[in-house]
Amino acid sequence: MSTPSRPGRRGRDVDVAVIGAGHNGLVAAAYLAKAGYRVAVFEKRHVVGGAVVTEEVVPGYRFDLGGSAHILIRLTPIVDELELESHGLDYIDLDPMFFSPSSDGSGVYFYRDADRTAHELELMAPGQGVGYRRFLDDWLPFAEMVKDLFLTVPGPFQIGRKVLRKRGGMNMREALGTITQPYGRVLDRYLTDERVIAPMVWMAAQSGPPPEETLTAPFLLWHPLYHVGGVARPRGGSGELTRALAACIRSHGGEVHVDTPVESVVVEGGRVVGIEAEGGRVSARCVLSACHVLETLDRLLPEDHRPDAVSRMRTGNGFGAILRLALDRPVSYPGHDPVASRTGLQLLCEGRQQVSAAYGEYLQGRPASNPPLVAMTFSAVDDSLAPPGHEVLWIWGQYFPRFLASSSWTEARSTVARSLLDQF
């Protein structure tokens, strides 16, 4: 990607100034540019992408610094509507999507094809494939309805109409009774083998709460959509998505400026009229902030215009920790196919008790001593990420508080890194 220039003359006019070139800001900017608006995006880092960026941290090895597996975007029309393939985006479908090895040497594979997944589960543990198929059949309509709500313009009438149209044969009273429950309890209705339950619990826990917390069932009931949209990777790294979005913006006459931090939002006469960026003021009919809400309201807005609610906002105390490794040989799961076991997300979870215990330590302000893990070795399907015969390995663990009760991350980071590797 060629490095775009910094803003030109002071006082240049645009319709929309976008603060931050993360994937959300870029998607919004791309739609606006395609609709004919004059758009300019301003990013303080040297590269677009925010949490969806890929960089060569170790020479010869390309690592995603944030989001890696693309799931939700596959359930939206974004890629097609913005014609991102014509801007260089090339998705690799991951199949199997997930692999979960067990301590007894067996392993569970979740394929894009739901019937194949259920069939192999039934062969491994009679009754589990039937239960899994019943779970999918019961909750796919609900998951589809939630997906459609996400793609609906917000508003009580629009959402209400969509619910009425999409509920199909669902018993809404029964569905409401289920979605208020803990997701661990919901799974007990369908499955009995912890080898199957554990990876499903672990995927639901990626949203945060442990499996026994009430009102968390929707984090599990989303699961059927994995078989609809699949799991994919942009060839060359996750950051290829945001590079394609930036190219799309430019192709429609928009501007994307990196190395250009925004210093403040300009307010005149009670209205936002632009931004003050490094290099000068940019006048805008509208400012779209795609950075953290507190960064927007507590720093960029002039003090006189900050909402009173800012002082009552709080952010969570961290969540997970990630270890990135450049390996001189591929990861190996003994007894399992050397490619299939490394293709998708590797869900290394002993069971729901492990998730709950790690969450308990997190609440105490301590790093999880026995964390469940997600391992990712996407060099198995994309040889551009590592030298021939080598591997890139991401290890993601939960739960890890940002603010520790009795130490600092300067002191704890090497111990946590070692524990993640030992656990893997």
Image (tube, rainbow, N blue to C red):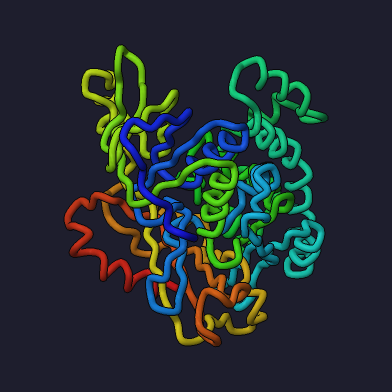
> Where 131 sits versus 312, above or below?
below
> Where 3 sits versus 284, above or below?
below
How many numbered tags mark residues here? 0
Residue 409 on image: x %, y %: 22, 59
Q: Quadrant of residue 343?
A: bottom right
Residue 252 on image: x %, y %: 59, 42
Q: Quadrant of residue 314?
A: top left
> Where 384 sits versus 403, above or below?
below
At 65% from the left and 78% from the top, the residue drawn is: 339
- 23 or 149, which lies in front? 23
Residue 64 in view: yes
Tell me: 39 left or right of 134.
left
At 75% from the left and 62% from the top, the residue drawn is: 117
Residue at the extreme front: 9
Residue 163 on image: x %, y %: 71, 24
Quadrant in the picture for the C terminus? bottom left
At 39% from the left and 38% from the top, the residue drawn is: 19
- 14 or 327, which lies in front? 14
- 10 or 30, which lies in front? 10
Residue 184 in view: no
Q: Quadrant of residue 126?
A: bottom right
At 75% from the left and 37% from the top, the residue drawn is: 141
Residue 244 on image: x %, y %: 57, 54
- 188 or 412, which lies in front? 412
